[in-house]
Image: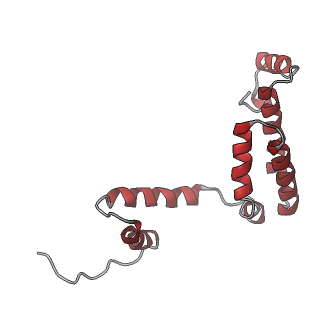
Amino acid sequence: MLKRKENLTGTQRIRLRDILKYNLQTVRAYLLKEQFQHFWDYDSPTWAGKLLDQWIALVMRSRIEPMKKVAKTLRSHRELIPNYFRAKKQFSSGVVEGLNNKVKVTMRKSYGFRTFRITEPVLYHVLGKLPEPQLARRFY
């Protein structure tokens, strides 16, 4: 049930068809997941947002708690999601993942810092590729 329909083998298609005959929570969650896949087919941020709002409303009425959790997350990021369509789907999340990795490595290297207030300038320095500051004292 986690695979897309187009990736199923013949026997998996038959088993899925048999399972979908029942009105189980699992089946309803599967159908909601499949319905959300249409979100990625849109080119217009307006229409994609409209589908997203309808899907969230449908999921919130479904009484399926894991799906409701996903819907709440999407609702909390609602104003940022259309940026994917405004950028015409040209940017991947690789840039964000790279920045997150740099942050994690920097935080791991700076394990001696006790507060984020002290770690914050280090992150600005690393992520902004700022030049090395001149030391107040030279150590030889």
Q: Is residue 42 visible?
A: no
**Is 102 on the left or on the right of 48, as rendered?**
left
The residue furthest left is 140
Coloring scheme used? secondary structure
Depth check: give the residue in front, 40 or 67. 67
- Quarter of the rendering occupied by the C terminus: bottom left
Instruction: Report the label total.
Output: 0
Position in image of residue 52 (x %, y %): 82, 52
Position in image of residue 14 (x %, y %): 83, 17
**Is 32 on the left or on the right of 92, as rendered?**
right
Residue 56 vertical placement versus 81 (above, below): above
Residue at point 37%, 65% (across, down)? 115
Occupied quadrant, residue 47: bottom right
Residue 115 vertical placement versus 52 (above, below): below
Residue at point 43%, 56% (across, down)? 104
Q: Is residue 112 visible?
A: yes
Position in image of residue 84 (x %, y %): 73, 60
Occupied quadrant, residue 31: top right
Residue at point 42%, 70% (across, down)? 120
**Is 69 on the left or on the right of 123, as rendered?**
right
- Quarter of the rendering occupied by the N terminus: top right
Position in image of residue 44 (x %, y %): 85, 61
Depth check: give the residue in front, 79 or 64. 64
Depth check: give the residue in front, 128 or 50. 50
Residue at point 72%, 50% (across, down)? 72
